[in-house]
Image (cartoon, rainbow, N blue to C red):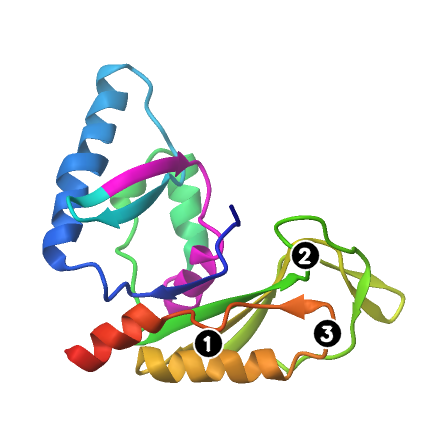
Amino acid sequence: NTGGMGAYSPALTMSGEQYEQAIETIIEPTMRGMAEAGTPFSGLLYAGLILTTDGPKLIEYNCRFGDPECQVLMMRMESDIVPLMLASTQGDVAAAPDIQWRDAYALTVVMASKGYPGGYEKGTQIRSMPEDQDNRVIFHAGTARHQDTLLATGGRVLNITATAPTVAEAQRLAYEGVEQVDWANGFCRSDIGWRAIKAEVGS
């Protein structure tokens, strides 16, 4: 079992009806249960869901951002996240301004060390990578600098994340970035976003 090897936002494969079902059958009962138990929660609660033939089902909750889901959300988020975090610590999220989202799609591809999720070599050199752009950013997840050398120190190492007016274009830009990373020990999945592109073409 690996961590996420890619993500995209918004999720075209989840219908409005499925979204409402998840809110009504998973999220709201969780909120009510915490309130009834006298265990209020302040912070970020990440629900890991899976779509089944019976609708969305809960796999797990995490008290943190999802990874790599966070990367695509940050690329689409126009609002300043700091006031939201501050409001959460002060118990006043309801008074925080609504989140503003970019009218764009975001897609991220994870580059991992060969061998992941099993054993993998640490300290392999990443010789070069493309510069960040307005519509493409590389998030570092498992890297370290040793003098002037960039080294891979983890299993999931880089997140090449792009935004575009369509999922297909965001996917193209992300994989173009992957091709420009000079890292002999890196690999990634080649199919991130295919379901969304299929839904996009079919719409």
Residues at marks 2 and 1 touching, judged by CB atoms closer than 8 Å: no
Q: Label 1 amino acid?
A: Ala
133 displayed left or right of 127 = left
Can residue 103 be seen in the rendering of this structure? no
Provide the secondary structure element on which disc 2 rests: loop
State the residue at coordinates (48%, 54%).
4
Q: Which mark is residue 115?
A: 2
Q: Which residue is depicted at the point 50% across and 60% down?
A: 5
Is 154 on the left or on the right of 151, as rendered?
A: left
Q: Which residues are magenta?
A: 57-79
Q: Amino acid at mark 2?
A: Gly
Question: Going from the N terminus, do you reach mark 3 or mark 2 first?
Answer: 2
Q: Nearer the viewer, residue 136 or 18?
A: 18
Please tell me whether residue 139 is drawn above or below residue 166 in the rendered image. Answer: above
Query: Which disc, if any, is residue 162?
Result: 1
Q: Left of 192 or right of it: where is 40?
A: left
In primary-sequence order, the first of circles 3 and 1 is 1
- C-alpha distance separating marks 3 and 1: 19 Å
- In the displayed structure image, the side of residue 50 where residue 70 appears, left or right: right
Residue 84 seen in the figure = yes
How many marks the image carries: the answer is 3
